[in-house]
Amino acid sequence: MQYKNKSQIARIETEKWVIDSLFCPLCGNRLNASTANTKVYDFFCSSCNQEYQLKALSKKIGKKLIGSEYYTFIKAIQNRSVPNFLVMEYSIENNTFKSKEVIFIPKVFISEAIIEKRKPLSESARRAGWTGYNLLFEHIPSYGKLYIVENEVIKSKSNVLKESQKIVGLYNMESNEVKWKIEILKIVDSLDSVFTLHDVYNKENELQKLFPDNNHIKDKIRQQLQFIRDDNVIIFHGNGKYEKT
């Protein structure tokens, strides 16, 4: 079948590539396409029941990703039914499809804080009032961006699963604990490769605004640093000094 425009071709090619070449980054089994009427996710794993939404771009992955309908997605976040994301950069040259980058974003890193509401379509538009969203890709810590394909090379399943196992525990944690860990990971991302406990303490006021009911911010900081040290994200050198791995 010949498709008439580039968007049709891209949709078919990207979905075909996921089905033929990709695997569930959390368990390693194959992914299946969702039904045509599913609004929030595009693929699912029949083994671990995880759902995935594909964001495919023919240009470099930037600071923001254009999403679908805002209210539907916000409802999915609130209901804790938001899918995991697969962000793909691709090219089609001389009728040849190439997957250049594929990044797995675990759903536990997707919150209302990184969803930007776009302006509703004008009254003269065919879908007047329809409201989309932008996903603020730059606000997701590097710990929540696992490369499956990098520089057109797909990583081995064993390596991807090894990396994803570091975040599996977040799926079963209470939402407040997940939020704490992600905020500390964001802070660590913003610091130099070698940093001190005092550097993290300097963010105490910001964390207090995010967690107004917590009266022991410094204690919580030390706890979370211990957790991400156990995940091999940082190394503790003693005397309050840490280093990113």
Image (spheres, grey):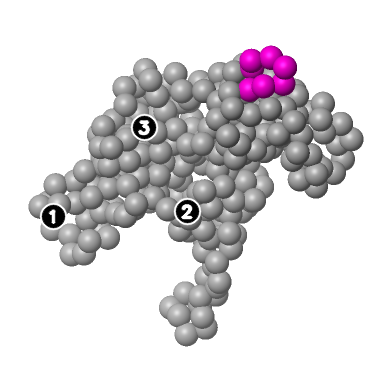
Q: Is residue 98 left or right of residue 192?
A: left
Q: Nearer the viewer, residue 84 or 42?
A: 84
The residue furthest left is 94
The overriding secondary structure of the stretch rendered in magenta is strand
Indicate the secondary structure of the residue bearing disc 2: loop
The residue depicted at 35 percent of the width and 29 percent of the height is: 23
Give me the residue at 25% from left, 58% from top. 8
Helix, strand or loop at mark 3: strand
Question: Mark 3 or mark 1: which is in front?
Answer: 3
Q: Which residues are magenta?
A: 236-242
Q: Nearer the viewer, mark 2 or mark 1?
A: 2
Going from N to C along the chain, the mark reached first, 3 or 2, is 2
- Tell me the mark number nearer the camera, choosing from 3 and 2: 2
Tell me where residue 168 appears, x and y as whole percent.
55, 24
Which one is in front, 124 or 216? Answer: 216
List x then y, in percent, for residue 111: 62, 46
Q: Are marks 3 and 2 in contact (CB under 8 Å)?
A: no
Q: Which residue is mark 3?
A: 148
| Residue 50's disc number | none
Label 3 sits on what residue type? Answer: Ile
Q: Residue reaching furthest right?
A: 215
| Residue 63 numbered tag | 2
Task: Mark 3 or mark 1: name the one nearer the start of the chain.
Answer: 1
The residue to which callout 1 is attached is 1
Per the model, the C-alpha gap separating discs 2 and 1 is 35 Å
Q: Position of residue 26 (x, y in %)?
A: 46, 26
Q: Residue furthest bottom?
A: 124
**Do callouts 3 and 1 mark residues in contact (Cβ within 8 Å)?**
no
Crowding at dot 3, Cα within 10 Å, few <14 / some 14-19 / many 20+, comes out as many
- Compared to residue 13, the image places residue 158 above or below, namely above
* Residue type marked 1: Met
